[in-house]
């Protein structure tokens, strides 16, 4: 059974849409209309922020909506002696995607941590290509004021700005060219170089917002990780990630579809919790932690043994081997010794790669557990829904039966 695939479906004239996506579309349209209604206010704010006489937002069809943000191009008309590009981008967080109404302060925290990440990268990783940050604003009305900053400070803060390249993004060309070893080697080399640059300075602990975007998608459920929390070792971090998945199962509407579905999801979460110690490299349980990439667009800090080869390489072991070989060569050349390449190789060989993805990807948790973790303990029979697996579910919680029955009623 694909635990994550069944949702109430609404028929359209030529297609179907599930209920969650339909409701989300309404929220998106409402937010976009709100921005459109305040177009002149935003343009005036940009003029003050950039100290230019005129700035025009791009047309509505030029706006790009992602999982958690909307990005809008703007065109400043700056004096000839000003070093501003012809096009900049302003990015707004989507408040309904990060539970701002239920947990006020989420947008504020997200913007602060993202701005701090831009500044940290610009100061510590000058060889990593990122957009320049020209300014940022917070929900309470605070924003950067270039007139009150020195020249060096003003260069570090602000609205995201970069000239859009004409080359195709990697995610567009990857499937077409990934079978060529020479083609793969080029992006692998650049990615490894970027990661090693970001990893030059270790962190002592992880903070709440340093979770991946996949986990952030659980923010509409009651918080189980709080703003002040930090993690110095991996075990409490993994346990809290699993608690987030428990919270999803308990509070997300339509998280389960029937009794059997609830039982197998609870069984998978129980299996992850019970098998955790088999997948940890205990000599690195207390770190170190490094800045890393999660999905080729978002940075966060992560404990060293959770810095894995990209998920989109997992279709073939040979791709992982080529990536780790290149990382190993780059790491040796840069640092004179090896740390992360052997950890990544061991994570792939031991199955830790799949375990860490299962605990950090709620939508894929059940399928990853079923396809890649169960077979490590049960052999080929673990890939089937064999009798016996469902016996785990009562150990998910002392009152698991009543909890599942309540979720079905709700």
Image (spheres, rainbow, N blue to C red):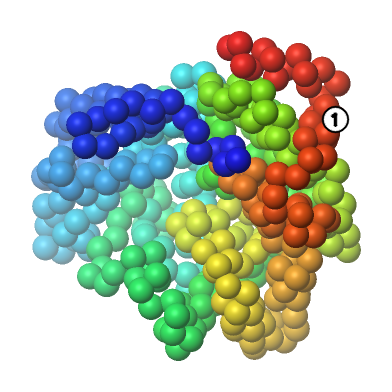
- Picture quarter with the N terminus: top right
Numbered-mark total: 1
Name the residue furthest front. Answer: 387
The residue lying at 58 percent from left, 46 percent from top is: 364
Q: Is residue 145 visible?
A: no
**Left or right of 194 in this view: 237:** right
Q: In the figure, 213 relative to 371: above or below?
A: above
The residue lying at 62 percent from left, 16 percent from top is: 408
The residue lying at 48 percent from left, 61 percent from top is: 296
- 365, 309: nearer the viewer: 365
**Left or right of 296 in this view: 263:** right
Q: Is residue 382 visible?
A: yes
Q: In the figure, 387 relative to 332: above or below?
A: above
Q: In the figure, 378 relative to 144: above or below?
A: below
- Picture quarter with the C terminus: top right
Please tell me in which quadrant of the rendered image residue 317 appears: bottom right
Q: What residue does disc 1 label?
A: 395
**Left or right of 322 in this view: 173:** left
Q: Callout 1: few (<14), some (14-19), or many (20+) C-alpha neighbours within 10 Å?
A: some
Residue 328 percent location from the top left of the image: 67, 82
**Left or right of 278 in this view: 103:** left
Is label 1 in a helix, a strand or a loop?
A: helix
Residue 27 percent location from the top left of the image: 33, 25
Residue 357 percent location from the top left of the image: 65, 53
């Amino acid at each position: 059974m694909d635990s994550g695939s069944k949702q109430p479906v609404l028929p359209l004239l030529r297609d179907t849409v599930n209920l969650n996506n339909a409701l989300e579309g309404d929220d998106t349209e409402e937010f976009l209309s709100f921005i459109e209604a305040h177009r002149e206010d935003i343009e005036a704010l940009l003029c003050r922020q950039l100290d230019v006489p005129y700035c025009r937002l791009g047309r509505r069809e030029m706006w790009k909506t992602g999982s958690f943000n909307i990005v809008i191009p703007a065109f400043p008309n700056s004096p000839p002696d000003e070093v501003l590009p012809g096009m900049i981008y302003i990015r707004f967080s989507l408040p309904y995607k990060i539970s701002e109404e239920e947990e006020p302060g989420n947008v504020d925290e997200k913007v602060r941590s993202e701005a701090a990440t831009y500044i940290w990268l610009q100061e510590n990783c000058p060889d990593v290509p990122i957009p320049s940050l020209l300014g940022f604003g917070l929900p309470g009305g605070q924003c950067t004021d270039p007139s009150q900053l020195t020249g060096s400070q003003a260069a570090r803060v602000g609205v995201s700005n970069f000239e859009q390249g004409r080359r195709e993004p990697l995610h567009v060309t990857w499937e077409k060219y990934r079978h060529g070893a020479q083609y793969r080697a080029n992006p692998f080399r650049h990615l490894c170089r970027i990661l090693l640059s970001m990893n030059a300075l270790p962190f002592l602990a992880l903070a709440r917002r340093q979770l991946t975007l996949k986990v952030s998608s659980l923010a509409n459920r009651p918080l189980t990780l709080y703003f002040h929390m930090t993690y110095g070792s991996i075990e409490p971090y993994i346990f809290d990630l699993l608690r987030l998945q428990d919270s999803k199962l308990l509070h997300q509407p339509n998280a389960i579809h029937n009794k059997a579905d609830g039982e197998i999801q609870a069984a998978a979460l129980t299996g992850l919790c019970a098998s955790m110690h088999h997948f940890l490299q205990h000599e690195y349980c207390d770190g170190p932690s490094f800045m890393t990439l999660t999905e080729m667009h978002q940075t966060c800090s992560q404990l060293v043994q959770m810095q894995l080869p990209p998920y989109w390489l997992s279709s073939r072991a040979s791709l992982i081997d080529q990536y780790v070989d290149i990382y190993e060569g780059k790491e040796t050349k840069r640092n004179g010794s090896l740390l992360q390449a052997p950890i990544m190789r061991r994570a792939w060989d031991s199955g830790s790669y799949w375990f860490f993805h299962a605990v950090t990807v709620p939508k894929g948790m059940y399928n990853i557990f079923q396809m890649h973790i169960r077979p490590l303990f049960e052999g080929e029979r673990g890939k089937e829904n064999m009798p016996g697996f469902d016996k785990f579910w009562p150990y998910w919680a002392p009152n698991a039966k009543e909890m599942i029955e309540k979720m079905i009623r709700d």
